[in-house]
Image (cartoon, rainbow, N blue to C red):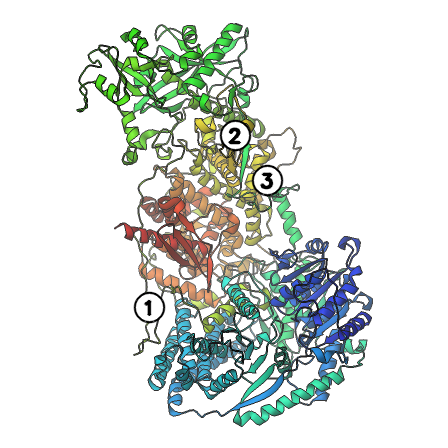
Amino acid sequence: MDEQNPVLGKDAASDANLENRPYQDEMVDRALRENIICALGTGMGKNQVAVSVIKRLQYEIEPAWSEGGKRTVLVVPSVPLVEQQTKYIQKWMPCKVKGYHGSGSVVSAKEGVKDDAVTAAWTKEDWDAELEETRILVMVHDILKDILHHDLIDVARINLLIFDECHHAVGDHSYREIRRCIQTRAEWDRPRLLGLTASVINCKIGNGAEEMECLIKDLENCLGAKVCTSIDESMKKHEALPTVSLDVFKDTQPDEEERKAVEGLDETITWMNAAKNYIVHLEEGAKKDYLNLSHVAPTDDRFRLTITKSLTTVTSALSNMKRSLRVLGPWCAYQTACMVKKDMELMLKHGCFHKEMTTPILGAISQVHMFGTLLEIHYKVHKINAGDVEGVLRLSSPKIRKLMDVLRQNKPESGDTSPLAGLRCIIFVAARFDAWALHKFFEFVTAKSNGEFRFLKSGHLVGQLTPDGSEFPIPYRVNLSYKQSCATLEKFRRGEINLLLSTNVVEEGLDVPHCNLIIRFDKPPHYCSHLQSRARARAENSKYIVLAPEEDSAKVRKDLDAFAGMDEIIRRTCVERNLPAMADQEMHFQDKPSDSYSPPGCKASVTLSSALSFLQRYTNTLMDDRSSSNVIRGQFLDTQPGQYVYRIYMSLSSAIKRPVTSSRPMPTQKLAKQAAALECIRLLHQLGELNDNLLPNAQEQLRDMKKILGLDFQREAGEEGGSIPGTKKRRQYYPKQSAALLSNCRPVSNEPLFLYTITTTFIRSFQDEPAARFIADQSRAIGLLSRTCIPALPPFDVFIYKAEYRVALTLVNSDTFLTEQQLDDVQTFHTNVYEQVIRFSEAIALSFKPDVADGAIYTVPLTRSSEQSSWDIDWDVMARVKEPSQYSVVSQPDEARKRMKITPDRYRDGVVTRWYKTDDDRFFVLNVREDFTPSTPSPIDEFSSFAEYFERKYGIEIQQLHQPMLTTKYCSREMNLLRCPIYKEDAASKTSKLTIQRDKSLMLVPELCQLFPFPASLYSKCLVLPSVMYRLNTFCQVLDLRRQIQRETGIGSTVQDPINWPPLIYSPKLTPATGTDSNNEAVDCETELRFPNSQTAESEPIHVPGPSTALEDSPIPLNGELPDNFEPGLVYASYQREKFYCIEGSNKRKQLTESAGESKRLISGRRKPDASEGKVSKVTECGCAPHLSDPPFLLDAEFNVDATTAPLPDVCQLLNALVTAKASDGFNLERLEVIGESFLKLTSYIHMFFRFPQHQEGRLTQLFDQQVSNYNLYRLAKLKGLQRYVVNQAFEPVETFVPPGFVFDEEESNAVLANSGTKAEKFPSPRIHQAIEDKTIADVVEAMIGTFLINSSARSAQLFMSWIGLHVLPELPGPEEERTTAERYGRFDVTSIPTPMLRNDSDTELVLKRLTAGFDDFENRIGYKFHNRAYLLQAFTHRSYDPNDITDCYQRLEYLGDAVIDFLITRYVYEDEKSFNSGMMSDMRSALVNNRTFSTLAVKYNYHNHIKFRNLRLYNHIEEFVQEVQEKDQDVLTLEADMMCTNFDDEKDTEEEGFEEADAPKVLGDVFESVAGAIFVDSGLSLDVVWRVYYNIMRPQIEYVVKHCPKNPIRELMELEGPNCRFGPGEPLGNGRWSVQVTILGRDTYIGKGNNIRAAKTNASKAALEGLRKTQR
């Protein structure tokens, strides 16, 4: 890029006026009159010319896009230029400027941020929205090319199109294709064009002016503009005119030592070149052999290219080592050898090479090692110390020594010899290896701070990010190299380094500061390179030096003279030129056939040159299983010489099911492929797969999505910078509400009231507790008084006094009347109970306001004379406890205590407080000990009596020495009595000393105690009230929801509710316990954490024998673990980049590959006998074989019940699905969530399968993901108000409970806290609000599905899903109003099943019979005979098998079978008698439902011999795995470490799906699932039939896993370390592998690696668990 405006400088204000130089004004005027190519040298201000033209035409882009405004577009050839030009233009333009590059990253210079928008998928509407505000667009050429081809932006609305570095517009460059698109438009619709270049010549030329004129005319015809430059004298002041000189050195001839060192390298290179030629020869022969067989594809190019590319990579590295020795010398060659050896070892151990290459690579590594060893022996390269300039120069080439002389001569003249003092130099080299090695060389020679070259600080820059300037978000290592390059350039700009070693990447396009020294280490290859590198020397008195050996000096000097002459020729040639004639422009683009396709009435067009990229974009939207990528396969057909016809075989997962042939013969093979691709595009558009812009039809996907999500679906907008709606991280606060059934229950006078008693029934005792006798007292009780009838509710358990009691609400009478005075007494008693007994008077901003509060049920004391008599309101107790002064604790003076009357009866059934203490603790009086008095000897040795104890410790003199002592027990202040204390013993060692003391009895002196007004038998029962009222409100809310569901769905509408609900049963395993009374935090009940027994054995590192240790530093282990300071070299970096481009990167650069030979022919005759082969029972009739064992349960009947007669889940069962683990209750939804999620998956898959019969797995999965996404479930639940019933907050009465009749003033609370100096609450108070994560609401929906499934029927669960808004059933015709869900939705039955046949002609049956030959054996093995064998054929057809044109591939059946097996296994684990918790259920499901298990069972039952595919790579992978399974010959697959799969249940959108390449071929697992799907549809949608077949297949494995209960390492680590465990993001390692880091705070960091993020995270957890186990030994 050009420098900033030198007149205003870099810090000029953005609204300043441009001050052009005279020659720039001349260029601007010409550009406004006609299309020109502005040919100005680097640094002459071409960008300023462009901005000036934009400013002059700004009036055309000011109107909004919707109002007809136009836009300016600047196209550039590389990513760095997008960012640089965007920032530069934004500096001078007040309007919005945006940059676009790669897969659509948007760079906004104005906002300084990046928006990761995928423009490749943008529609015309998306671009219209983007252009509404953006006035100037800076983009990489490929993006504009796609925009024009797809007619996403009308060319006529581009007012100015600027081509930066326009000399690239030759050959097949995208600049030329852009102009080709524009050339097809009418002349008045074409935009104004402006080209910017420093050199109009971009190649070598030989005939001087004549050839130059031809090249210039060709560029003009291409761009439709004329080349212009200025002859203004002012140009000379600003041109880069360095002193050009040639420095000659005397090169040496190779000596004997050098020849010996490279001898081994030569032999290896020769052998590998011969091997490469042999493979190419085999490839050509294979193509000739299959030339006339149109139905057979040639061998798999992808497999061959792997070996060929490997050989090329190795030979290139070895050749660069040879070059380094010859050009740079022994020391640099040695450094290069070390780097190459490390890279090769790393690539080998990461599986970067094909297994066939192992031996050749090991041989090459040995040769590299030998090369380094010989350099050590002959030159002693390893004994040179850092900073030893003379020593390293002695081992360097004459060329390097000459380079050092040049640097010495240009040493800064000032006295300051510190680095970066005055020198700024670029050294251009031809080879990337040279730049790297020279950088290492300069680092070495400048190591000493006082050395001769201490004024130098070097950096190196090599390569370009991608061949076409694109940037991609993955893998990160490619981005990292780009960032490192940018960092190096930034250091050079800031002056932190002053010596930049670079390839030609710095010649153009990058913003490089003025340099005063440019050195061409190698001669410039052509004039353009010379001109651009020379232009970097723009400082005053700068130098441009070319190094050349003596023998070539004359030729190099002649070239430099010729280059100088070309400057003048171009200057003369580019003056007063004419615009190219229209005929010449048209002729320029007639270099290839003009075949194209445009949708009728549309401007979008696909040409031959763009057809392959269009088709590849479509194929990349199809599902890719990574065993056979979405590359375009095909073959050339036999035609006449010089004419080529190509046939393309589309994947069976595409809409085109038959081969497509080019419409006519073409003169070249490339054009024939393009013609066939063009025909495919035409067919895809006609089939509706492409829209009128020839893009994958997003509108169809949108229509399908609206069918699933609803026409009115709008995604909820999250807060700016906040969490995404629907995720676990997004937490919202919802107001707590009283149940509608309790909304009008406040008692009033003189009206009939309902009186209830709270009865407590003893269940069990955990420990002996004397105070338990008070709650067991049947003479007193607590009653509830309500104006309305409280519905019958289930009994439930409370835990108090180390015992379990069952609480029930019993109606005493329904005609209690109260007078006004009695009602006042009841209110007073009610407030005293909650404020004084339960101590809510201590709470802030809590006040009794029954007129305002919801659910004001009053509390009353009850009494009866005997157990048989009825309960009555105890008015006497009310009167005794009414006086407020009784509750104030005051100290008693000596005189008052002397007069005190102390009698045993007064203290029996009493509660006392110690007035001499400030803790306000209360104690139950267990016994009045008349045998103990204050004068009784004290049990404490240092005190003679209790009286002496109190006198010495508290200074209190006991006045009545003969009074009886009181045996008391501490009254617990714990108000949450819903927690089971069964696990408190486990935490005994952590219990505080105070807690232990409170558990013991305490002797108190009556005169030192104040008697509390409430008797102990009533006080103890009052403590139950918060738990009772909390549970009462929750039950009534659930009952509200239950009645709503029953009313609207019709489920259980004919079934009467039970008179007595079954009790709410707690599960001790799920009930957390607290260690102290005031603990508000749930404690995990699982305390036993076990480490996995299995360990992954590490392979030994590859060892290359040799005497040297210097060359073998830092050996790399086989498992790929790298030292922290290891930096991959150029070989490995090149591999990563190229692998990235070919596999992970741009769709535009995927190569055409040929399919493999027919798999059945390849496999036949080579299969080893199966371990399971033997006598197989023959199945003679369609359906299941009679010898199959019955499964443990059947399911079909659950789908066929009448939902109106099916029982609705009761209150407790529904509550179980609404309580989360955060509530810390005795139960939670997690088990139900697991089974509900699986059933939701099954029913959704079935619905998608039948509703969209034309969609393949990829599209179906997208729709499924949208339906079951956390956001959609959360959205639907909120529409039904389900969040009102969710319990996601632990019951902590002190913080989260508002007593009945009371109200909480949040504003008052915050004001009180603020006045007291305490920070006000940041979030809404938990008393009146409940925080619920969006994902938690989604989890509740899944749990509700689970409870309907388990406690009602499968049909009921389906109707509940339909009621909430999920699409799982077919809708019956009829009006929606006044119909229940059961009446609106039908069932899927046999008539819904689509036919598997793609065609039904006379040959279909014959083809089906031929393709299914040999399947009888398979049917006998699995015990099922198909009614329709077309399903069986489809289940075994891989998408690469194009001979099958009568059925689809297996993807749709796999999609269905996956859900069927997942549900059957999940239901089995759920139904197990051990009642596994949710974590164990997920772990067992993961261990059973995964690719390795399925693949192993597929081999055992001979699935692999029937798969129909055409892919040699896939065949090799299957063969390896089959051999491994047969060699192990195991009855079950043991729970090895690699088998465990991790199920993420947080963000489903981010879940990675990996190809388990090193373990099991995914296709085997896919076919195992597809056969299950085939049986399901063939049997008439019978889960029982599938379960019977697959239960017999999987039974040993199922029983083994259930018995051994695998544990997920991630969950185990999280349980062990909890918040101390931090997982980092996944980082790609190349070759499809990932790395994840886990940090245990305060301990260590562990790294795991795997084929996908889940595997890497699992392995990191295993490493952490193993490390923690070692530290605990």
Q: Is residue 1196 above or below residue 1415?
A: above
Tell which tag, 3 or 1, sits nearer the viewer.
Answer: 1
Task: Tell me the tag on residue 71.
Answer: none
Horizontal and vertical percent position of residue 1400:
60, 56
Q: Disc 2 to disc 1, how far (Cα)?
A: 69 Å
Q: Is residue 761 above or below residue 1547?
A: above
User: In the picture, residue 854 is in which quadrant?
Assistant: top right
Which residue is tagged 2?
1315
Which residue is tagged 3?
1370
| Residue 1484 in sight in this render | no
Q: Is residue 706 left or right of residue 440?
A: right
Horizontal and vertical percent position of residue 730:
53, 42
Horizontal and vertical percent position of residue 931:
19, 12
Label 2 element class: helix
Q: Say which residue appears at 49% left-offset and 30% top-offset.
A: 1316
Q: Disc 2 to disc 3, how far (Cα)?
A: 62 Å
Amino acid on which the number 2 mark rests in the picture: Asn
Question: Mark 3–mark 1 contact, CB under 8 Å?
Answer: no
Tell which tag, 2 or 1, sits nearer the viewer.
Answer: 2
User: In the picture, residue 901 is in which quadrant?
Assistant: top left
Local packing at callout 2 (Cα closer than 10 Å; few below 14, some 14-19, many 20+) is few
The disc, 2 or 3, on the residue closer to the chain's N-terminal end is: 2
Q: Disc 3 to disc 1, how far (Cα)?
A: 60 Å
Amino acid on which the number 1 mark rests in the picture: Pro
